[in-house]
Image: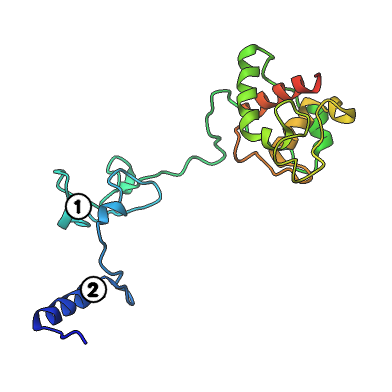
Amino acid sequence: MMKMTPKKNIIILVLAVVLGACSAEGEFPGLEYAPQMYHSIPYEPLTQIRDTEQGAWLSSIDNEVGEFYNSNPNNPFGMTMREPAANTVRRNSGDYLPYRIPKDSIELASRVLTNPLDSSDAVLKGGQALYNSYCYPCHGGAGQGDGPVAAVYLGVPAYNVGRYAELTEGHIFHTITYGRGRMNAHGSQIDIEDRWKIVRYVQQLQKQ
């Protein structure tokens, strides 16, 4: 049996005190190890620390405020993020408005939507790159429904067969946006312009 020396007892006691001090209890959040890993120095819009003394004990920047202070003094009330005006729309390179046709109105989308992009080589090349990232796993490189996922989940259609070869650009765009059947929606992953690029490329695959 190992004999505990006074020195070892002191070390164990110190470790117990240190580890106990790090634990959170009640309103005490506990101590942080390497707090710079948890608190970013730049402004963060989703946090609001207006106390200039917060983190002063470890401040590594000579700006006379604590490390955790992140309010923006250039905005009213020191806000880090200001709410946009009502009914405003985020600017984008093509001035596209948000897509508002409801999910269950694919026939309407098929009739009224037209692709704002031409069939230039640049658009098709961009559409192919996006297609390879998002569509290839199921639909395959040539749109034959033979991607690696389709080998497991059967029934992925070929673009150039039957009614799929006749799908309109609006139908394709709407399907990419909301998904259809076992295909998941991609509207939150691919912006509007890139969806239209994919549509151009898919229409090329429909003719093969």
User: Does residue 135 appear anywhere in the picture?
Assistant: no
Instruction: Give the Cα separation between the discs numbered 1 and 2.
Output: 23 Å
Query: Mark 1 belongs to which amino acid?
Result: Gly
| Colour scheme employed for the rendering of this structure | rainbow
As drawn, is 78 to the left or to the right of 157? Answer: left
Query: Mark 2 belongs to which amino acid?
Result: Ala
- Residue 63, above or below 2: above
Camera-side residue of 111 and 141: 141
Residue drawn at x 54%, y 28% is 92
Where residue 78 appears, as percent x and y from the top left, is 30, 47
Residue drawn at x 14%, y 76% is 11
Pick the quarter of the image with the N terminus.
Answer: bottom left
Q: Which label's residue is closer to the chain start, 1 or 2?
A: 2
Q: Name the residue under label 2.
A: 21
* Displayed quadrant of residue 32: bottom left
Residue, far right = 162
Residue, far top = 120
Pick the quarter of the image with the C terminus.
Answer: top right
Where residue 168 appears, as percent x and y from the top left, is 81, 26
Q: Name the residue under label 1.
A: 66
As drawn, is 100 to the left or to the right of 78? Answer: right
- Residue 31, above or below 66: below
Q: Are marks 1 and 2 in contact (CB under 8 Å)?
A: no
- Residue 120, above or below 68: above
